[in-house]
Image (cartoon, coloured by chain):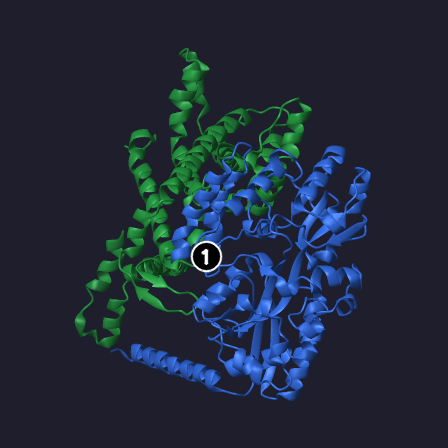
């Protein structure tokens, strides 16, 4: 081998060894630990709160050099997080929504129950049982459900008054909402009721309606499709009539933003109240009753530790600190908490200028314990896309509702069975 | 020429020692070749890093199943290729791809050529019209598509104009045929300017005396266009056909922003389907298989056009 080539090979070998040694050092080292958590908020107040909690933790833990909160755009959050994991650049901790099922089932998350139960003063029993299910498998918690925001019915009382309509909160049903919405549309040309974020695409948000009819997307263990059930047929018949017969729900391709004053009602999470800018008078009510009676639905977000982290122990320790009773109370300023002790109307009203303590008691505190979550399944994106492709046929005036719903089951059955 | 430079060095006696041998190895022809390789090295490096290696990796991924959350890969052989054959959605996707690409290519070339022929004449405002038709090319594709998304809503600008004219416009993005028309139209309007400019340049290269001679011989406008103009600009026609087909097969943002492939699968073109499989469903293996299928389509179409050029491109025989 020529001398130059020998030198080159030696340099490469040395470089590789040095890099390997460097990597090994990083992995094994318990000092100068740098933790990173991906989040989808870019709200400065949220990030300032997280930073302040992290600073307090670092002050007591000299081995932790830094804790960074990396804001990723909400729309691309799942894709970016997945790409980071696949590319070997996974964060130590991450927020998660519907990706949680995939992360848990693939063993990518660190089990938390033992750590949190053993953490001094953490009070694991304070967690509301209904909010842990989405992030648990076989009784083991894999992510702390830090945000549990119930869906509620926002009402534009100005639009109702303009149409000469009044709302009876004591007997609020979906039929009543549709009738009022239809009247508002006829009188003002504005939309009746909208399901926020649905946009004739994100069909899982319609669980806020079909649960009122006793329907569910699939059975409890996610193996059998529920779209072809009579209850689901009733729910979609109601929605189809609302769009094409009663015209109480804006149809596909029609923009109607409740928070811009374009609709009389909106189903949206309580946490969206920040979008109310005072340009119209409003009210908030629990979701209307349907044939199945009272019900409530929450949208959740969790925080977990990734198994691929080089500092699992440090990351889990920080998560336990971030979610202990004292810090959970701070997080509750912005995110409806999972702890029974923090779920009070007065407590929530202290940081909410849009609603009274009584309203928050009704639409949050009273709803969380018995709430169901939006449908979520392993491989959420493919299930969502396959069902959406089939459901698109629903949104034409002459759609055959039972046939379309049967086609949804045909599309997702192989995924549910997998 | 090369011989006159090289031969004296090749003829140098071998007895001049190591320095002479080194000089013989470093001949002028080799120096020229080295310089040539240095010039193409940046491009070669780019192709290697951004084309050859990714294609090689895509082939490897297509033979494996990759759990992106754990990093575990399992060799599955041809299973992803079999899955493509068994995929009930794929024929619909390929159909949508053919309709979209075919529509874009035909409309783009026809409209680009028509605009170029019209704007090739000097008239008041011709420069303004050229700028107007070219300007969408320099606009961000996402911004362009977002604006069209608002215009194409049921209560959007286009139906507003139609209503003012007494017509009831369709809900453009909510039924298969109109959604396909919408995505094709927005793609054509955005990209027709580049073809128009290329055709304009080609038209201005056609010698004026040929037109003069044809007119003296009594040829009409139609005959002049098909017998003189079209043959003489056929190399440009070949170029625009290739880049338009490749561009159409790679159109992603229009679909992602305007329709997300819907309604149903009516506007799900292959490149969007690849994205869904690989990055939404995290099925990197199957996504890579489909990406290789797309690459094969592009290559086959390009080769076919290149081979056919002898038949329809002037100067090629």
Query: Furthest-top residue in view?
Result: B218
Left or right placement of residue A195 versus residue B60 in this view: right
Residue B31 at x, y percent in the picture: 32, 62
Q: Which residue is mark 1?
A: B279
- In the figure, the green chain has which letter? B
Residue B85 at x, y percent in the picture: 30, 47
- Residue toward you, A229 or A145: A229
Q: How many dots with numbers? A: 1
Residue B7 at x, y percent in the picture: 22, 59
| Residue A239 drawn above or below residue B213 | below
Q: Residue at x 23, y 72 (%)?
A: B21
Quarter in which the C terminus of chain A is drawn: bottom left
Q: Residue at x 71, y 67 (%)?
A: A334
Q: Note whether residue A416 is visible.
A: yes
| Residue B64 drawn above or below residue A187 | below
- In the figure, the blue chain has which letter? A
Residue B79 at x, y percent in the picture: 29, 56
Left or right placement of residue B311 versus residue A268 in this view: left
- Residue toward you, A341 or A260: A341
Q: Note whether residue A41 is visible.
A: no
Give neighbour class at mark 1: few <14, some 14-19, many 20+ (Cα, 10 Å).
some
- Residue toward you, A310 or A177: A177
């Amino acid at each position: 081998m020529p001398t130059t080539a020998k030198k080159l090979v030696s340099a490469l070998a040395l470089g590789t060894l040095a890099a390997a040694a460097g990597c090994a050092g990083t992995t094994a080292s318990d000092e100068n630990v740098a933790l990173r958590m991906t989040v989808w908020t870019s709200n400065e107040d949220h990030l300032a709160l997280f930073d302040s909690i992290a600073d307090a933790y670092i002050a007591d833990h000299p081995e932790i050099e830094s804790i960074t909160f990396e804001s990723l755009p909400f729309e691309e959050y799942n894709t970016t997080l997945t790409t980071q994991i696949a590319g070997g650049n996974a964060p130590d901790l991450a927020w998660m929504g519907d990706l949680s099922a995939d992360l848990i089932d693939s063993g990518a998350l660190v089990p938390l129950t033992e750590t949190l139960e053993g953490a001094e003063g953490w009070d694991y029993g304070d967690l509301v049982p209904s909010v842990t299910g989405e992030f648990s498998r076989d009784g083991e918690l894999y992510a702390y459900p830090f945000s549990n925001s119930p869906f509620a019915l926002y009402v534009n009382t100005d639009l109702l008054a303009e149409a000469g309509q009044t709302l009876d909160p004591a007997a609020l049903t979906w039929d009543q909402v549709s009738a009022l919405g239809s009247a508002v549309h006829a009188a003002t040309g504005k939309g009746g009721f909208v399901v926020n974020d649905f946009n004739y695409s994100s069909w899982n948000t319609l669980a806020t309606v079909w649960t009122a009819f006793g329907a569910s997307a699939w059975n409890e263990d996610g193996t059998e499709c529920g779209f072809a059930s009579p209850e689901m047929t009733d729910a979609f018949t109601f929605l189809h009539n609302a769009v094409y017969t009663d015209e109480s729900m804006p149809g596909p391709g029609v923009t109607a933003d409740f928070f811009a004053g374009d609709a009389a009602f909106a189903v949206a999470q309580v946490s969206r109240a920040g979008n109310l800018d005072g340009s119209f008078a409003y009210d908030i009510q629990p979701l209307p009753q349907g044939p199945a009676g009272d019900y409530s639905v929450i949208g959740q977000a969790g925080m977990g530790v990734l198994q691929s982290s080089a500092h699992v122990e440090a990351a889990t320790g920080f998560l336990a600190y971030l979610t202990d009773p004292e810090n959970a109370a701070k997080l509750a300023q912005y995110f409806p908490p999972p702890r029974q002790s923090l779920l009070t109307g007065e407590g929530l009203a202290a940081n909410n200028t849009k609603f009274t303590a009584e309203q928050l008691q009704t639409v949050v505190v009273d709803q969380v314990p018995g709430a169901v979550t939006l449908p979520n399944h392993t491989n959420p994106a493919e299930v969502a896309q396959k069902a959406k492709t089939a459901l698109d046929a629903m949104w034409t005036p002459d759609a055959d509702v039972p046939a379309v719903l049967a086609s949804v089951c045909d599309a997702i059955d192989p995924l549910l069975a997998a | 020429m090369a011989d006159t430079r090289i031969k004296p060095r090749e003829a140098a006696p071998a007895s001049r020692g190591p320095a002479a041998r080194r000089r013989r190895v470093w001949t002028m022809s080799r120096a020229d070749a080295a310089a040539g390789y240095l010039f193409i090295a940046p491009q070669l490096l780019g192709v290697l890093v951004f084309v050859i290696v990714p294609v090689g990796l895509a082939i490897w991924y297509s033979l494996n199943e990759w759990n992106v959350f754990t990093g575990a890969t399992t060799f599955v052989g041809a299973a992803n290729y079999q899955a493509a054959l068994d995929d009930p959605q794929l024929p619909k996707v390929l159909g949508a791809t053919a309709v979209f690409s075919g529509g874009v290519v035909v409309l783009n070339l026809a409209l680009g050529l028509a605009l170029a022929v019209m704007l090739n004449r000097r008239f008041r405002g011709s420069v303004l019209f050229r700028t107007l038709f070219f300007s969408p090319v320099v606009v961000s594709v996402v911004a362009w598509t977002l604006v069209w998304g608002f215009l194409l809503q049921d209560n959007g600008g286009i139906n507003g104009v139609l209503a003012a004219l007494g017509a009831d416009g369709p809900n453009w993005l909510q039924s298969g045929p109109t959604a396909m028309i919408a995505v094709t139209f927005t793609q054509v309007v955005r990209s027709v300017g580049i073809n128009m400019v290329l055709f304009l340049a080609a038209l201005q290269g056609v010698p004026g005396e040929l037109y003069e001679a044809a007119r003296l011989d009594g040829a009409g406008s139609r005959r002049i266009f098909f017998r003189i103009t079209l043959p003489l600009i056929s190399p440009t026609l070949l170029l625009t056909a290739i880049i338009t087909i490749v561009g159409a097969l790679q159109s992603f943002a229009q679909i992602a922003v305007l329709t997300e492939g819907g309604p149903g699968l009516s506007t799900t073109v292959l490149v969007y389907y690849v994205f869904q499989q690989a990055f939404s469903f995290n099925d990197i293996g199957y996504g890579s298989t489909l990406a290789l299928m797309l690459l094969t389509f592009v290559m086959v179409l390009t080769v076919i056009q290149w081979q056919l050029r002898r038949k329809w491109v002037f100067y090629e025989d």
